[in-house]
Image (tube, rainbow, N blue to C red):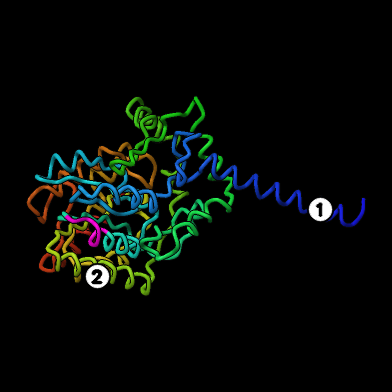
Amino acid sequence: MTFSKFIAYILGIGVLAVVAIFSANYVIDPYSVFGTKFFPEYGQLQERYLKIEYLKTHPEFNTFLIGGSRIGVIKTEIVDGYLPGAKTYNLTLSQARPIDIEKHVEWLERNIPNLSHVIVQLDWAGEYGPISPGYALMNESHPEISGRFKYGFLFNFLTFISIEALRVKVGNNNSEVIGSFKYDLGKGYWSHPFLDKKIEANCDEYVANEKSFSSDNIHPTKLNSELLAKGLSSIARIKGFLEKRNVKLTVFLTPINHHQIDSIDVKDYERFIRQLVKFTDFYNFMYYSKLTKNDCNYYEASHYRPVVGELIIRSLAEQPNNRGEIYRYVTKASVDTHIDFLKANYFLKE
């Protein structure tokens, strides 16, 4: 083989490899950004892109749930049933941090003409900060939020290959698992109907086989003062620009599973609560209660089930009460009492 033929051969292989990557990403569409539907069941949605694209042509919503993936199981029809006049969309954003929430609320403020209520879920503050996403590109912001060129954004999804994302998309279209993960893009929420059936059929067996409930998988998450300050600054800005438009803001702390509460240092927790209440009143579900101590309320130690979502919305619809059944409503006036409660509650973990 001559040198020129060898070079042509190598270049040909390179071109074929590039074409193969482009074709796999377009046909399989692991993040569903191209809408090709060769594999109709969702894999890992690029929520930040798809939801903004959907809302651009559906401006009729006036109430929005927003936060990390945990809030994603709250059904919008439940919210509409409890909150008079609400037409709700669940703008859950996988692995969202306060800055992500802030950017998306700003977009809502600019683009949703009838915006009247934003419900923000905040996770434990020890999770604020840099993260390594499970899927590359999953946390890229929509071009209208980031300011990037739209086709440059999509080109990244065409050229980058993630074996894990491709595997999940194809795997979710296997005849044996179709329907195990459901996502309603028109309402914004997700569910695991197969897991719900397993839990309801035999919760004890499910919990015993779910490794995330083991104490061996619980690791302390310490606060970082700088990242905490940045996160709370986002909350302050959200509250500020929503108040100017007379849009109601409701903030609540996630009812994380008791195994995760175990990992929180009580002094860190007090610091978080005292800092947050300086900027906004909020509902706190993040402590030991009959809700958080019942593993049957969770798919695993990180994500609660839809039944919990309904309990949250029912609580938010009540007149704020310092002593709700599964929450405490925290204000500047009640924060000292609330801290005393949390310190006493900390000893209920056993």
| Residue 289 placement (x, y as % from top left) | 23, 47
Q: Are the residues at dot 1 and dot 2 in contact (C-beta closer than 8 Å)?
A: no
Measuring 20% from the left and 42% from the top, which residue is drawn there?
311
Q: Residue 8 carries which label?
A: 1
Observer-nearest of 218 and 303: 303
| Residue 234 placement (x, y as % from top left) | 29, 68
Which contiguous range is marked in magenta? 108-113
Q: Does the magenta stretch include residue 102?
A: no
Is 9 left, or right, of 326 in this rendering? right
Observer-nearest of 24 and 275: 24
How many marks are shown on the rendered structure?
Answer: 2
Measuring 28% from the left and 41% from the top, which residue is drawn there?
187
| Residue 4 placement (x, y as % from top left) | 87, 56
Q: Is residue 260 above or below residue 187?
A: below
Circle 1 residues within 10 Å: few <14, some 14–19, many ≥20: few
Residue indicated by mark 2:
237
Q: In this view, does 208 lie above or below 52?
A: above
Amino acid at dot 2? Arg
Observer-nearest of 8 and 180: 8
Is 321 left, or right, of 53 in this rendering? left
> Farthest left residue?
319
| Residue 336 placement (x, y as % from top left) | 15, 67
Measuring 13% from the left and 50% from the top, which residue is drawn there?
324
Q: Overall secondary structure of the magenta stretch? A: helix
Instruction: Kindly state the secondary structure of the residue where label 1 is placed.
Output: helix
